Amino acid sequence: MRTRVKICGITRAEDAQAAIQAGADALGFVFYPPSPRHVEVAQAAAIIRSLPPFVTSVALFVNADRETIAEVVRETGIDLLQFHGNECPEYCAEHGRPWIKAVRMKEDIDLEKTAADYAAARALLLDAYQPGVPGGTGAVFDWERIPAHLAGRIILAGGLTPDNVADAIRQVKPWAVDVSGGVEAKKGIKDADRIQRFMRGVELGQE
């Protein structure tokens, strides 16, 4: 089964096109102002309007209020919501879009219980834990902590690069992988060559 790929932290139309041309299945847009990859609603809407069919647009939020989420949904027509904060399952489900829940892999996290609590999510996105940082740390966590039977619900994130993504896929066999910093020239600016190399790594991981 083919591993899907999401390129997150898109801020420029040219980066979106580079990701699409390389074969990305989904593009992520960060609506969290403290992030260096934050994108304004109008800017994201313009990029999303240029996307071809069958490329999923994903909006990333961190403890955002209802009005913020509603504005993004209304103005961008975003396909999927991604929650990176302390949002409860009920809150995630009330915005009229399918959603995924990011889980920071703290040492004491009970992934089985979290998967059950967020059973309505389309997937769980697993990211490395760093105190005070909701995501995009560039750190890798121990992939052996992921139960094999959950792999089909997992989007693997956290420190993935063109150099380690093949090993990650071979070991975890996730439904999808998610990358941001690992394909950047600098924060918020993607590198087309690194995106291509990442996609080649994904292919290698499935051979």
Image: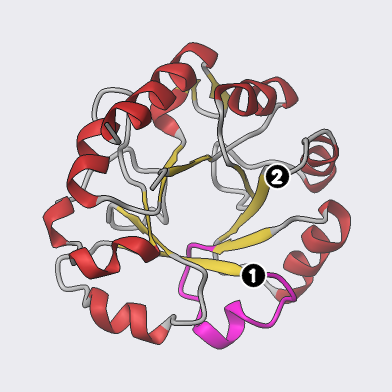
99 in relation to 22, above or below: below
Name the secondary structure under disc 2: loop
State the image coordinates of residue 47 (x, y, percent, origin top left): 79, 35
Name the secondary structure under disc 1: loop
Color theme of the render: secondary structure
158 in relation to 79, above or below: above
* Residue occupying image coordinates x 87% and y 55%: 75
Q: Neighbour class for label 2 at 10 Å: few (<14), some, many (≥20)?
A: few
Badge number at residue 98: 1
Magenta span contains residue 132? no
Magenta span contains residue 85? yes
Badge number at residue 33: none
Residue carrying label 2? 54
State the image coordinates of residue 139 (x, y, percent, origin top left): 26, 41
* Residue occupying image coordinates x 68% and y 48%: 57
Q: Which quadrant of the figure contains the C terminus?
A: top left
* Residue occupying image coordinates x 21% and y 41%: 170
State the image coordinates of residue 68 (x, y, percent, origin top left): 75, 65
* Residue occupying image coordinates x 64% and y 28%: 20
Q: Residue furthest top?
A: 193
State the image coordinates of residue 64 (x, y, percent, origin top left): 63, 67
Magenta segment: 83-97
Q: Name the N-terminal-most of marks 1 and 2.
A: 2
**Quick one: 86 or 206, which is closer to the camera?**
206
